[in-house]
């Protein structure tokens, strides 16, 4: 079992000089036995790429996005989060109350308060009672808040890429967004990232 | 076994034990060991997956009295 688990990984390490082998068995090998995990070390692991499209901006989905993004970063996956439509509200500074230039854009931000700490639940929001209970439970069970997860994701090098079109439509400026965001891009760049990734999620 | 750093992730929910461990392991040198203690039962499989993905080695993994202990070697 041990030898079977380590063999493909070692082969891949040798083969890495010539080409770019896909090491699919690395995680399975590591899960099977501890010695196999040792065999998988020393840079034999191919860097995987993950793209998350953060679309919804709702509390529970934002939470899922940030849990997966921060963990992927910690797993040393090359992780990009493309932020579009309602998702962009999450990445406006918490203290920013109103964004936009014309009355419609201002109204939109007024109706849905921007910022990672002000997300609403898609169901059972109950005028903020739902999120309040969620945060209370999260604290009780030592679950990291979306804000903490966002900071940890940024610390492990996750790229947060805003959608230019969404910024224009909602009148959100670069200075409205939190620090450390990437340059805004369009759908073509997002699609290129997705097709080059090992996995893509639309949340 | 020479453990350079011990991380107590007891009581923390997913994904915090993994996030804490990945921060901690970067503070020790290549080939050095850290020990992580967690109470999240999901962490048993999660640490194996994390090791497989990062190339850091999961040297030991055991549990006793609802505590899960992991020894990890920095790649």
Image (cartoon, helix red, strand yellow):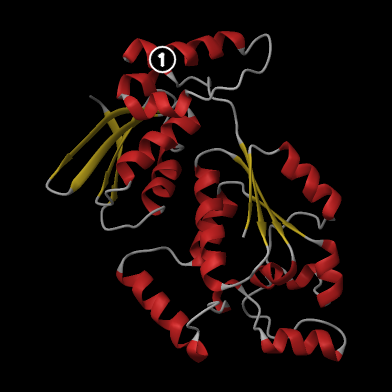
Task: Note whether B66 is above or below B34 in the view shown.
Answer: below
Quarter occupied by residue A46: top right
* Quarter the C terminus of chain A occupies: bottom right
- Residue A96: give x, y in percent of width and height: 68, 81
Going 76% across and 90% down the picture, which residue do you hit?
A107
Numbered marks: total: 1
Locate residue B31 relative to residue B36 in the image: left or right. right
Q: Mark 1 lies on which chain?
A: A
- Residue A114: give x, y in percent of width and height: 66, 78
Between residue B61 and residue B4, name the one nearer to us. B61
Task: Note whether A78 is above or below A168 in the view shown.
Answer: above
Look at the image and tell me whether residue B56 can be seen. Answer: no
Task: Say few, some or many: other residues with alpha carbon within 10 Å of mark 1 (under 14 / 14 to 19 / 20 or more).
Answer: many
- Residue A22: give x, y in percent of width and height: 60, 22
- Farthest residue toward the front? A123
- Element assignment for label 1: helix
Residue hosting label 1? A6
Quarter occupied by residue B2: top left
Look at the image and tell me whether residue A16 can be seen. Answer: yes
* Quarter the N terminus of chain A occupies: top left
Locate residue A157 relative to residue A82 in the image: left or right. left
Between residue A150 and residue A15, name the one nearer to us. A15
Going 38% across and 63% down the picture, which residue do you hit?
A143
Task: Note whether A1 is above or below A160 in the view shown.
Answer: above
Quarter occupied by residue B71: top left
- Residue A81: give x, y in percent of width and height: 67, 53
Task: Note whether A34 is above or below B12 in the view shown.
Answer: above
Between residue A72 and residue A196, name the one nearer to us. A196
């Amino acid at each position: 079992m041990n030898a079977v688990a380590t063999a493909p990984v070692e082969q891949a390490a040798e083969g890495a000089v010539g080409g770019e082998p896909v090491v699919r068995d690395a995680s399975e090998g590591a899960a099977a036995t501890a010695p196999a995990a040792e065999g998988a070390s020393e840079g034999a692991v191919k860097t995987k790429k993950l793209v998350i499209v953060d679309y919804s901006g709702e509390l529970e989905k934002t939470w899922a996005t940030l849990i997966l993004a921060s963990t992927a970063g910690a797993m040393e996956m090359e992780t990009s989060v493309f932020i579009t439509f309602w998702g962009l509200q999450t990445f406006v500074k918490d203290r920013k109350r109103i964004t936009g230039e014309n009355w419609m854009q201002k109204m939109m931000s007024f109706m849905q308060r921007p910022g990672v700490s002000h997300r609403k639940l898609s169901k059972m929001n109950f005028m903020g009672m739902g999120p309040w209970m969620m945060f209370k439970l999260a604290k009780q069970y030592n679950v990291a808040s979306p804000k903490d997860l966002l900071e940890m994701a940024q610390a492990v090098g996750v790229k947060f890429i805003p959608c230019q079109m969404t910024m224009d439509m909602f009148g959100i400026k670069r200075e409205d967004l939190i620090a450390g965001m990437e340059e805004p891009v369009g759908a073509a760049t997002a699609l290129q990232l997705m097709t080059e990734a090992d996995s893509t999620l639309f949340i | 076994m020479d453990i350079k750093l011990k991380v107590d992730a007891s009581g923390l929910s997913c994904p915090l034990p993994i996030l804490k461990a990945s921060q901690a392991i970067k503070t020790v040198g290549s080939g050095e060991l850290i020990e992580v203690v967690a109470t999240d039962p999901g962490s048993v499989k999660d640490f194996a997956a994390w090791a497989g993905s990062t190339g850091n080695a999961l040297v030991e993994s055991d549990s006793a009295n609802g505590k899960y202990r992991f020894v990890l070697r920095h790649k």
